[in-house]
Image (cartoon, rainbow, N blue to C red):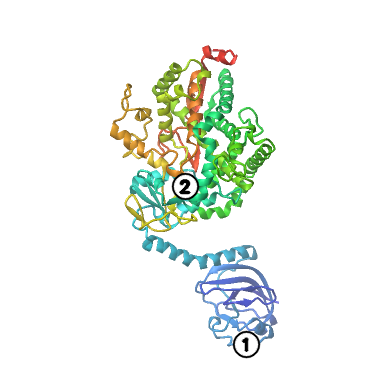
Amino acid sequence: MPQKRVLFVLTNTAHIPGTDKTIVAHPYYVLYSQAEIVLKGGLSPVDPMSVKLSIDQVSQIEFFDLICKPLVPYNGVCWGRGGAEAAKEGRSEGGADEPARKRDPGWAFCVLAGPMPTPEDAMPMDATYAVLAVYFLGPLAFFIWLYRIIFHPLNKFPGPVVARLTDGYSGYHAAHRRLHLATYRNHQKYGPVVRQGPNRLVFNTKPDIYLNQRMTKSKAYLQSLLSTRRLSMFNALDRAEHSRKRRVVGQLITERSMRSFEPSLTLQIDVFLHQLLASSKKSEVVNMTVRCQRLATDVVGLLAFGYELNTQTEDTNSIIPAAMKSNAYRIGLYIAWPSISFFDPVFRWLGRKRIPKFYQTLRKMIGRRMSMPKDAAHDLYAVASGDVTASGDRGLQDTDLWSEASFFVVAGGMTVSTLMSAIFFYLSHHPDVYARLATEIRTTFNSGRDIASGPRLSSCRYLRAVIDETMRAAPPTTATPWREDDVYSATPPRSEGPLVVDGHVIPPGTSVGVNLYSLLHNEALFPGPFEFHPERWLAIDDEEDGAYGKEVQATMRRAFAPFALGDRGCAGKAMAYLEASLTIAKTLWYFDFEAAPGKAGKVGGGTPGRTDGRERVDEYQLYDIFTADHDGPNVVLKPRAQFTNEWGMKSDA
């Protein structure tokens, strides 16, 4: 019996004969199901462009997979029925000649010209639904985008067109770890105020935003709730809740508290120096990013829970620094593009070898510390846990302790390592700075063991200038700390009139912020922003040449905010300065070092000829993961033989 392959064209909602499927067709899309039509009596249409089939002529219908295509004009003639039951019974409702689209919902056959697709070419059902979803959501997205471009209250602010439409603009650059560079470039192109999202404005002026008492952290920070749904000091929006958490945790990282922790810190720095000595004896090229990250990880493990991670000497927990970077990357991406957090299960799967290891180790640290007396170590658990802390606030318990620890370990372990790695980069690339700092350290102290917090370390003004200049040139946090008018606190601050930032009225629901990398490279605030010049921070009456004028220095000081400002600024300032000061001073006391020869020595710097902001050879390259990722510098070290005997060792030099 001859067969004719045609397409089953669904004109509206209908039940497919012979199946249990019900399908909805749309006026602008039609659903085709490839079918095998077996005709009775050996009838074979001569002209498939004009043939009409009646139900009496159809012997069998075998349906294949559904496909979905846009509705296009065709020359075939539809044959339709008023419904599936009528088709089964052979009754005609509406007449075979009446166009199917004019009758009640039903189904229709249509013979189309041209080659018919095979079942293997048919689009899967999921794809069909996806196309329909695009059709329905497309007009909605169009009108939203039209509003954001033309009618949105922020449309007077300049910025990339894509950024006006979607936070995906920031998400794209965050995914490629270069959002800070894109922000800097946008300021160069559009000016000091840039619309970097549908509801976001980034400023490149003095960071007074963070001193405004009407401001609180943006709701985007809630995207950082990765391991627990309990808020931490990092993402608490309520001002009272944040203040309580900051008082509790902040007790640990005050200058006074850090002096109590200094013996433990010094022991870890000594391990760091021993590892450098071992590498120098082998004439190895040393990647300081790796060494600084391991040092900072071991330090923060002790500071948090008195736990010896030993990443500097053992491989057991060596994956922890990489896991911390993975977490920071996710946080940075989700804050830049909150909607993408929907795919967090995918990112967790991609990081399945690192992220679970981090949380397993964190759980082990907490469990071990809770089994010990509270005062067994000077750490976060001793200071912040319990019913009531020394500050009189309710202490951290259960999931509160877990959430604070997750943030504390990542923030404390990554920001300080970035600072120290960048210092090694700039010292190895600026021999004049290196020589001046080495002289200061080696003439201030009598031995390496004398290097400790106190008046003599504080007198090393050039060391402090190098640290400050490094944080300006390579801020440990490259992301924009977003702020909003506070509507989240249980008792929001009283405000009269609209929110005004730098002379601009800010509409409700708008996030504002200052990108630290862009701010600290703003030539109007920092002369020669891409020059590494520690002298800019020296006192005006310094005897050495290079100190900047009083007015210029005052401007720079007001804009210098590597730790952010206000009550939401980074609480770990004292910790960062102490760890960096001791590490750099001790390294310069015991070693001479320089950039590795050849290609290895170029790691960490920019590449000439690039046009994405990474072309400066003498700029330490940061990769935006909310904090910062980096590589290098690679250095070679030579121990100062006359001092290595302080450790009871003997140098080969």
Picture residue at 66% right of the left edge, 83% below the top: 87
Q: Is residue 582 visible?
A: yes
Disc 1 residue type? Ser
Q: Is residue 332 visible?
A: no
Q: Residues within 10 Å of mark 2 (few under 14, many from 20)?
A: some
Q: Is residue 444 left or right of residue 229?
A: left
Q: Find residue 340 and report its horizontal and vertical position in percent.
A: 53, 53
Residue to which mark 2 is pinned: 173
Please identify the quarter of the rendering in which residue 7 is found: bottom right
Tell which of 389 and 215 is nearer to you.
389
Q: Find residue 4 and report its horizontal and vertical position in percent.
A: 64, 74
Q: Is residue 443 left or right of residue 91?
A: left
Q: Nearer the viewer, mark 2 or mark 1?
A: 2
Q: Secondary structure at mark 1?
A: loop
Number of residue marks: 2
Q: CA distance from mark 2 to mark 1?
A: 60 Å
Sequence order check, earlier mark of 2 and 1: 1
Residue to which mark 1 is pinned: 92
Q: Find residue 121 and report its horizontal and vertical position in percent.
A: 61, 63
Location of the C terminus (image quadrant)? top right
Q: Find residue 518 and report its horizontal and vertical position in percent.
A: 39, 42
The reply to whether discs 2 and 1 touch (Cβ–Cβ < 8 Å) is no
Picture residue at 46% right of the left edge, 29% below the top: 423
Image: 72 above or below 492 = below
Please identify the quarter of the rendering in which residue 379 is found: top right
Tell which of 581 and 637 is nearer to you.
581
Disc 2 residue type? His
Q: Secondary structure at mark 2?
A: helix
Location of the N terminus (image quadrant)? bottom right
Image: 260 above or below 364 = above
* Disc sitting over residue 150 in the figure: none
